[in-house]
Image (cartoon, coloured by chain):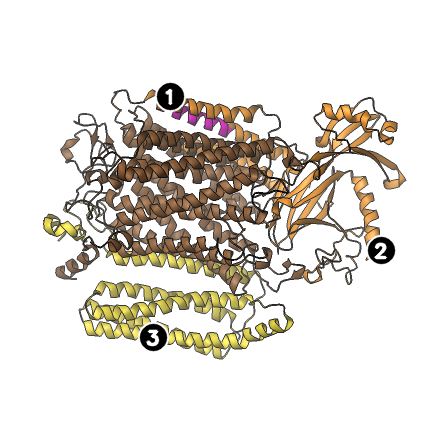
């Protein structure tokens, strides 16, 4: 295919990338140019690079968390309600990974309507996660932070956020930001895929992002919640 | 034209850089600690090696530029010579890493060795933009401290718990640091607000003082390294008479400017066993180049009578801050005085008693 | 996947026509060449501000008296902070990578554009936003931060550490966080473009060294800015939401204990320098690539040890991530860790030494033409040696006990990361200007620019080494010490200030030449310097799709100069294989 495209000079005028197929020229090497050596669409490769970079950001946040956790006496504020909610959130998020897989599969099989449906369901899963998480946040702010803020106001000494909540909001907040952005991404994607502007590959790339966000939660959940749970 | 100018520029650069480095006598300030010599040696070895590399590389560049300037010749088609490349890897690797390993002994002595237990411990406290120094006092134990007790109005800058901790009552807090010579000393660096850096050039000691952290840095001042010169023809009686004019010539001939307000102060105290020990402090002043009327700093020397010979030592130094700590960073300075062990003990015992009765 | 499906997928990225309206053509353009120029313009604006600030604080130091200071100590530190931040982020990171990289990386590999043109545009506009947020710090109450370009907490984390200021510091952190996002997007684009969009025959080892340098730099940016982003995020939380990541217990301001507890100032330093050291290479690696490219061109010789150069760039990229601790030898970090960092730091001298050897080897037996571009490239080699040599001092933990945070450090990193990088930018500009604008820059003016700059920057920074040996700490707004009242100190400060004025004014000459030549310069042909790489087969300036509808096919390595038996003294990469029967296999 790449050979054919390379000789089609008119087509190459504005789209020489057409020559960048998945197979090298005869006798050529994968890395000799004119082909995508990794055998993946550029968008997919780009998303992988984003994931590499983003996981380093999360790693740095979790490193900071471990750093302060190890140098302090750490409380165990999560019990009962928090654990139930966060387990439910985990379940919803993991389920949304499954619907994402189904969306990618449907898109690759050119089942457009099905792919849109599964993508929208994935977004819905993300949305439920965000709503549950926000409720959880509000609960924590009410139960744990408001008393401190009030006390700070009364004594006029100002208030500071205890380390355990600082790390909690930093890590889960960063993750929730990713989920929120992801929900928007999926909704736009589903609509644009429906009217043909986006392709199957775009669903696949979004799938990579979504699975990554899920994976990050699988680090955040045990490290932030379970390790600080009192049962 | 261009190549020749470039050659001249590179030659001037090398000579202009290397010559001052090799001829200037006081390239670095004097050094008075036992570990300082090893640091200086490492610096000078590095300077020698890198100076040679620097000169060679710049000269090589100048040579290439001059020799191979375009004169209608055809360039030689060569993609590289393997042994040059391997050679450059191996030689630079051995050189750089070897140089580094040579320096690790210095580091290990300073940071990795357990400081001597007999060492005199001095707590150094940085705050915006002052240094305060605490000594454990006669009991040899630092009292507890807490940030809650900090009260600048009553001069409790580091929150020493004078009320409840019996070890705290005799602790001595000063705005200048006094260090005994020929004794192991450990400074415990702390900060109460932002990061500061305890730097005394002549000690070759520099380390950050970080809030929430205590860093211990050991050193030992060698008296002999503070030695400047002998005062010939001067007797104890002249010095007791505080006659500056009698010593002015000797000081000035050693490059120490003696100002009109310079003074000699005899200092006497009883050492262990009641023996009276005496020295004379000679103080001249460095006037600010920018504000020579209002601003000046003391330059302190001590004269010791050693078997009838009057020997002059430089005993006054400056502590500076070397980590950006706010707008007053450049003013964060303290005096450092180096005294004999006996004098240090006598001084500390007296100050400790005073502080105890005050608290 | 069916073939038809495949083709459909492949087309979409690159089918775009040249827009006609001004706003889409020049402002919100997705053309990598326009974006490259936009980055370059941003860098010019930033460099004027950054260097102007340096003149302000140099003038302050030269005319200092305790009563009549040109800047007060706050303003002095603000100028120093903003000078560092603007130059490191908005000039040294944007011009060589965002500017030249964007413009020439796709062309040098034979691509029509970046892999993701729209992301490319996003990356520029994020960078501009970051710049505007940073500049906004000048106009908010209290002004810009005073905590240096490194922004160490607690100084940068607690408002009461710098009374009356605060918003400026928050904007500073915010600006850096936005810059991280911009760099991340840009880096992804560079990496994918380099690997996926190379023309046929453009194997990795045929890429010009400039392309290699941009590629490796992008990888470094991808990995390092991610950590700075996390570090900056936590700093914002500490400042605005009362967390204590970087603030330990027992911190006292205004004689009152703060409620913060549990954090560590060293945590920030680790996160910052994990980015900060690779950042040095982000600034200098593209310069190394550009200079290699130019040296070969004007020496009319193949790069000496091309493979070694590639491996050296890659090695610097890798080792650069394991040496950050050498910024923290005196920080209270574990002294055992310091030993490891110190040894690793010295190993990074090896690839740097290889590069120097190979530059000299490239000149050796050459036929050197002294254009302005070549002069700046040669100046770069000289500066790289001078600045690199002082790194041998600072990389040794024992020696750093004395030199840490003195003028020696300032001189070291300015020579290597500031001035050398600036020289590579100037060299690249004189070299590629004919391609970018179809006109030459004025050569006599260029040579004057070189000589003024070369002499003045050395006059600024060589004396600073000596002041460092003297123990002069950096970031001092005044001289309130006995030891700084040695008459040598003010006379050197005066000399440095005078030289700094010359150095900065010389850059105005350059900027004038740049804009003047755009309209008045002599018209340049396609290949004005008889170069070999793909940018020289395009029109000057290149067509919207770079190669005017032709698809380049590469048959030669990037530096086939003076091949024996060939007609011309250069073989272009797209020349047919038989053009150079005696060329070494590449």
In the rendered view, does C406 fall on the left or right side of B6? right
Q: Quadrant of the C terminus of chain C?
A: top left
Give the color of chain A as drawn.
yellow
Judging by the rendered image, the residue that carries numbered circle 2 is B357
Q: Residue at x 16, y 52 (%)?
A: A14
**In the image, is residue C199 above or below residue A178?**
above
Cα–Cα span, label 3 and label 2? 72 Å
Main SS, magenta residues: helix
Q: Quadrant of the N terminus of chain C?
A: bottom left
Judging by the rendered image, the residue that carries numbered circle 1 is B4
In the rendered view, does B275 fall on the left or right side of C341? right
Q: Can residue C449 be seen from the camera position used here?
A: yes
Give the color of chain B as drawn.
orange
- Specify start and end residues of the magenta stretch as a single range: B49-66
Cα–Cα span, label 1 and label 3? 73 Å
Q: Chain of mark 1?
A: B
**Residue B65 on the magenta span:** yes
Judging by the rendered image, the residue that carries numbered circle 3 is A125
């Amino acid at each position: 295919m790449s050979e054919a495209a390379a000789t089609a000079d008119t087509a190459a005028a504005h789209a020489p990338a057409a020559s960048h197929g998945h197979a090298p020229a005869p006798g050529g090497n994968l890395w000799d140019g004119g082909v995508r050596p990794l055998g993946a669409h550029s968008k997919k490769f780009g998303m992988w690079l984003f994931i590499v970079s983003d996981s380093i950001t999360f790693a740095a946040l979790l490193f900071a968390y471990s750093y302060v956790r190890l140098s302090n006496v750490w409380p165990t504020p999560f019990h009962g309600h928090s654990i139930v909610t966060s387990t439910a959130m985990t379940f919803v998020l993991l389920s949304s990974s499954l619907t994402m897989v189904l969306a990618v599969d449907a898109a690759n099989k050119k089942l457009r309507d099905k792919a849109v449906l599964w993508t929208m369901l994935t977004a819905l899963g993300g949305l439920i996660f965000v709503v549950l998480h926000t409720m959880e946040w509000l609960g924590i702010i009410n139960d744990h932070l408001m008393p401190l803020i009030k006390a700070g106001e009364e004594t006029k000494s100002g208030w500071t956020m205890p380390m355990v909540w600082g790390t909690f909001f930093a890590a889960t907040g960063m993750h929730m930001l990713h989920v929120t952005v992801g929900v928007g991404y999926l909704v736009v994607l589903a609509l644009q895929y429906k009217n043909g502007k986006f392709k199957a590959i775009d669903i696949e790339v979004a799938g990579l992002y979504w699975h990554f966000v899920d994976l990050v939660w699988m680090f955040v959940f045990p490290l932030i919640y379970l390790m600080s749970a009192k049962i | 034209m261009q190549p020749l100018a470039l050659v001249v520029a590179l030659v001037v650069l090398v000579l202009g850089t290397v010559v001052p480095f090799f001829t200037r006598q006081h390239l670095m300030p004097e050094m008075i600690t036992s570990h300082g010599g090893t640091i200086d040696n490492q610096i000078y070895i590095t300077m020698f090696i890198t100076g040679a590399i620097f000169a060679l590389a710049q000269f090589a560049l100048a040579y290439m530029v001059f020799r191979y300037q375009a004169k209608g010749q055809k360039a030689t088609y060569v993609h590289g010579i393997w042994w040059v490349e391997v050679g450059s890897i191996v030689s630079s690797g051995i050189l750089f890493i070897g140089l580094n390993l040579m320096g690790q002994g210095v580091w290990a002595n300073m940071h990795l060795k357990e400081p001597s237990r007999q060492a005199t411990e001095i707590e150094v406290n940085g705050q915006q933009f002052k240094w305060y120094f605490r000594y454990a006092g006669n009991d040899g134990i630092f009292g507890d401290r807490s940030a809650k007790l900090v009260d600048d109005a009553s001069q409790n800058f580091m929150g020493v718990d004078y009320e409840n901790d019996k070890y705290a009552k005799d602790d001595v807090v000063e705005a200048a640091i006094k260090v005994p010579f020929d004794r192991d000393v450990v400074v415990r660096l702390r900060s109460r607000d932002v990061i500061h850096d305890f730097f005394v050039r002549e000690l070759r000691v520099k380390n950050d003082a970080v809030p929430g952290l205590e860093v211990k840095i050991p050193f030992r001042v060698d008296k002999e390294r503070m030695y400047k010169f002998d005062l010939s023809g001067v007797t104890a009686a002249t010095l007791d008479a505080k006659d500056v004019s009698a010593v002015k010539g000797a000081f000035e001939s050693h490059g120490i400017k003696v100002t009109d307000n310079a003074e000699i102060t005899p200092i006497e105290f009883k050492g262990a066993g009641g023996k009276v020990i005496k020295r004379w402090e000679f103080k001249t002043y460095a006037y600010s180049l920018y504000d020579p009327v209002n601003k000046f700093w003391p330059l302190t020397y001590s004269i010791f009578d050693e078997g009838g010979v009057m020997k002059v030592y430089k005993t006054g130094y400056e502590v500076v801050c070397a980590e950006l700590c706010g707008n007053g960073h450049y003013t964060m300075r303290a005096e450092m005085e180096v005294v004999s062990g006996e004098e240090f003990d006598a001084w500390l015992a007296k100050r400790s008693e005073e502080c105890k009765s005050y608290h | 996947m069916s073939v038809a499906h495949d083709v459909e997928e492949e087309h979409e990225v690159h089918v775009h026509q040249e827009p006609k309206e001004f706003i889409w053509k020049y402002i919100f353009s997705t053309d990598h060449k326009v974006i490259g120029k936009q980055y370059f313009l941003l860098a010019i604006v930033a460099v004027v501000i950054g260097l102007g600030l340096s003149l302000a604080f140099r003038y302050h130091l030269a005319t200092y008296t305790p009563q009549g200071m040109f800047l007060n100590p706050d303003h002095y530190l603000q100028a120093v902070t903003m000078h560092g931040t603007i130059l490191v982020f908005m000039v040294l990171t944007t011009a060589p990578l965002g500017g030249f990289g964007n413009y020439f990386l796709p062309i040098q590999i034979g691509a029509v554009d970046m892999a993701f043109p729209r992301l490319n545009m996003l990356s520029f506009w994020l960078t501009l936003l970051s710049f505007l947020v940073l500049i906004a710090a000048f106009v908010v109450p209290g002004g810009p931060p005073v905590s240096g370009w490194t922004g160490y907490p607690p100084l940068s984390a607690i408002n009461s550490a710098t009374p009356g200021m605060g918003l400026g510091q928050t904007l500073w952190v915010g600006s850096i966080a936005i810059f991280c996002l911009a760099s991340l997007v840009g880096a992804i684009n560079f990496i994918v473009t380099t690997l996926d969009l190379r023309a046929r025959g453009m194997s990795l080892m045929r890429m010009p060294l400039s392309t290699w340098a941009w590629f490796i730099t992008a990888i470094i940016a991808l990995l390092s800015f991610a950590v700075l982003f996390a570090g900056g995020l936590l700093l914002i939380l500490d400042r605005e939401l009362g967390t204590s990541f970087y603030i330990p217990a027992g911190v006292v301001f205004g004689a009152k204990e703060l409620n913060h507890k549990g954090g560590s100032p060293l945590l920030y330093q680790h996160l910052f320098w994990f980015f900060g050291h690779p950042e040095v290479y982000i600034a200098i690696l593209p310069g190394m690539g550009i200079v290699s490219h130019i040296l070969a061109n004007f020496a009319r010789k193949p790069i000496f040890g091309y493979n070694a150069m590639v491996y050296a760039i890659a090695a610097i990229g890798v080792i650069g991530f394991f040496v950050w601790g050498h910024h923290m030898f005196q920080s209270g970090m574990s002294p055992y860790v310091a030993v490891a960092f110190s040894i690793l730091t010295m190993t990074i001298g090896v690839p740097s030494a290889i590069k120097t050897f190979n530059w000299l080897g490239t000149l050796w037996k050459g036929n050197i033409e002294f254009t302005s571009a070549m002069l700046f490239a040669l100046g770069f080699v000289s500066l790289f040696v001078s600045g690199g040599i002082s790194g041998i001092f600072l990389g040794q933990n024992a020696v750093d006990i004395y030199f840490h945070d003195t003028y020696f450090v300032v001189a070291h990193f300015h020579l290597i990361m500031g001035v050398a990088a600036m020289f590579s930018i100037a060299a690249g500009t004189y070299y590629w200007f004919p391609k970018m604008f179809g006109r030459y820059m004025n050569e006599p003016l260029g040579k004057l620019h070189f000589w003024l700059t070369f002499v003045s920057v050395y006059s600024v920074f060589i004396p600073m080494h000596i002041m460092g040996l003297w123990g002069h700490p950096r970031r001092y707004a005044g001289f309130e010490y006995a030891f700084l009242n040695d008459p040598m100190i003010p006379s050197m400060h005066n000399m440095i200030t005078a030289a700094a004025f010359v150095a900065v004014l010389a850059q105005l000459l350059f900027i004038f030449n740049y804009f003047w030549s755009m309209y008045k310069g002599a018209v340049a042909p396609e290949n004005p310097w008889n170069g070999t790489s793909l940018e020289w087969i395009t029109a000057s300036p290149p067509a919207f799709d770079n190669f005017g509808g032709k698809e380049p096919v590469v048959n030669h390595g990037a530096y086939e100069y003076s091949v024996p038996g060939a007609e011309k003294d250069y073989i272009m990469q797209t020349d047919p294989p038989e053009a150079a029967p005696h060329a070494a296999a590449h």
